[in-house]
Amino acid sequence: MKEKKDFGDILDRWNRSNDITDKDKQSSAETSTNAERRSRLRRKKPDAVIDIHGLTRDEAWEELQRFFDDARRQNMEKILVIHGKGIHSQGEAVLKRVMRDFIQTCPFAGESGQGKTGGSGVPWVLLK
C-alpha cells in the first residue's frame, strides 16, 4: 500500500533543494521571536536607573538625553526613569510630561510601561 505524503513536507524539501526560503514561515518565526523577546524584556530588571526628581524641565530633558545616549552606547535593553507623580505640580505633572515628550521624540526609545513599584511615577523604557 502506498504511503500518503504530506504536501508541506514535499514543498519544504523542494524549497531546500532549490535553496529557496519560505518567507511566510520565516516571517511567522520572526514574529514569534520578537514577541518572545519583548515579553522577556518586560519581565527583566532594568539595566540602569535615573532619578530626575527636583529637576527643571530643561535640566530633566538634558539628563534624559545624556542617560538614553549612554544606555544605547552600552547596548542596554531596558532602563528605568524615576520622575515621581508630580504631587507638587500645578495641573499636570511637569516631569511626567517631559518624560512622555522625550520618549515620543527619542529615535531609539521603544515600548514603555509603568514600574511595579512607583506606578506612573516610575516608567521603564525598552531601547531599540
Image (cartoon, rainbow, N blue to C red):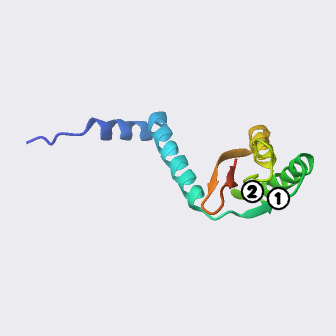
Q: How many marks?
A: 2
Q: Residue furthest left?
A: 1
Provide the secondary structure element on which disc 2 rests. Answer: loop
| Towards the viewer: 103 or 55 | 55
Residue at 49% over, 34% down: 23
Q: Position of residue 48 (x, y in %)?
A: 75, 63
**Amino acid type at image mark 1:** His
112 or 10: nearer the viewer: 112
Q: Is residue 123 visible?
A: no
Badge 2 amino acid: Gly
Horizontal placement of 111 versus 27: left or right?
right
Where on the picture, by quarter, is residue 103? top right
Q: CA distance from mark 2 to mark 1?
A: 7 Å
Q: Please name the residue shown 79% across and 38% down the image.
A: 105
Which residue does the image show at 88% across and 46% down from the upper left? Answer: 57
Q: Crowding near pointer 2: few (<14 within 10 Å), some, many (20+)?
A: many
Q: Which residue is mark 2?
A: 84
Q: Where is residue 84 shown, x and y percent of the image?
A: 75, 56
Using the rendered image of the protein, determine whether residue 105 is visible from the camera's viewpoint: yes
Q: Give the left or right position of residue 65, taking residue 7 as reference.
A: right
Quarter of the figure with the N terminus: top left
Q: Is residue 37 above or below residue 101?
A: below
- The percent position of residue 22, horizontal first and vertical second, equals 46, 36
> Horizontally, is 61 left or right of 109 in the view?
right
Secondary structure of the residue carrying numbered label 1: loop
Q: Which residue is mark 1?
A: 53
**Disc 2, disc 1: CB below 8 Å?**
yes
N-terminal label among 2 and 1: 1
Q: Quadrant of residue 83?
A: bottom right
- Quarter of the image for residue 98 reads top right
